[in-house]
Image (cartoon, rainbow, N blue to C red):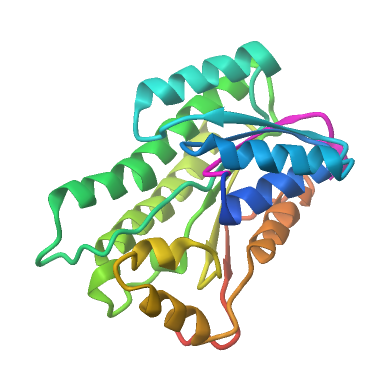
Amino acid sequence: MDRWRGRVALVTGASVGIGAAIAKSLVQHGMKVVGCARNVEQIKKLAAECVSSGFSGALFPYKCDLSVEDEVLSMFSWIKTQHKGVDVCINNAGLALPEPLLSGKTSSWRTMMDVNVMALAVCTREAYQSMKEKKVDDGHIININSVCGHRVLNHADAHFYTATKYAVTALTEGLRQELREAKTHIRATGISPGIVKTEFAYRLFSDDQEKATAMYNSVECLQADDITNAVVYVLSAPPHVQIGDIELTPVEQSM
C-alpha cells in the first residue's frame, strides 16, 4: 500500500458499516480519503477518531445525496479544487428495500436503481474523467457488489435488489473492457460479499427487526473488516495484476 500514501480515494456510503471500515483503513494506510454520505455527522466522528488514533492519512467528510446527479458533480468539482482529483474510487453505497416483483412499490424500485446502479455509474464516469485529467494511469475503481449480483436467491423481498446487483456485475466487466480499449492501466474490480453483519438487514427489515436479527444469527457472519481486507488486497496487487472479482461468504452460508 506504500504507493498509495498521500493519494486521494473517494469512498461512497462512508458513514456506517463497510464504507466506514474501508475509509478508516485507507486513512490508516496514509491516504487522503473523501468519505461521502447523506449523514455526514457520522463521518465527522470517524474523521475525529482517525486523528486521535494518529493515522498518517486524513478523512474529509462530504455531504452528498448520490441519487442527485448535480450533488455528485458538485462533489467531484470540490475534490478537484481541494485535492486535484481522485486516484481511487470505491463505489460502496447501496441499499435494499423489501419490494417483491409482484407487489413492490415503483418508488422503492426507482430508489434502488438510483443509488445502486445510476449513482455508481455516474461516480465511475466522473472518477475516470478525474483520473484522466489528473494524468493518473494507475488508478483503481472498486465496486462493492454482492453475491446477489451472481445468483438469484429464492427470497421475494430481495429480487429487485438482486437485479440491481446483477447490473453492477455487468457494469464492472463493461468498465474493465472500456478501460482496456482506452489504453489505460486504470483497473476495475468487483468485491461481492455474502452476509456481512452491519446495519444492512436492519434497514431492509425495518418493520421486522427480529427477522434481521435471525438472519445474522443464522451463520457466523462476515465482518466489515473482512471486506476492508479484500479492498486492501486489491489495491496492493502489483500494477500488472487485474483482479476482476472477489467473492467472500461466511463458511456456513449455503448460497
- Residue at point 69%, 18% (across, down): 83
- Residue at point 56%, 75% (across, down): 249
Q: Position of residue 228 (x, y in %)?
A: 68, 57
Q: Up-down: is 184 above or below 75?
A: below
Queried whether the magenta region covers residue 9, the answer comes back as yes
Q: Position of residue 81 (x, y in %)?
A: 63, 11
Q: Foreground: 232 or 158?
A: 158
Q: Position of residue 66 (x, y in %)?
A: 41, 34
Q: Is residue 140 visible?
A: no
Horizontal side, residue 139 vs residue 165: left or right: right
Q: Position of residue 23 (x, y in %)?
A: 68, 44
What is the quadrant of residue 161 in the picture? bottom left
- Residue at point 39%, 37% (across, down): 119
Q: Up-down: is 28 above or below 147?
A: above
Queried whether the magenta region covers residue 84, the answer comes back as no
Quadrant of the image for the C terminus? bottom left
Q: What are the residue bounds of the magenta stretch?
A: 1-14
Q: Foreground: 45 or 71?
A: 45
Q: Up-down: is 197 above or below 234?
A: below
What is the quadrant of residue 96 in the picture? bottom left
Quadrant of the image for the N terminus? top right
Horizontal side, residue 234 vs residue 121: left or right: right
Q: Is residue 78 visible?
A: yes
Q: Residue furthest left?
A: 102
Label total for image: 0
- Residue at point 54%, 86% (across, down): 219
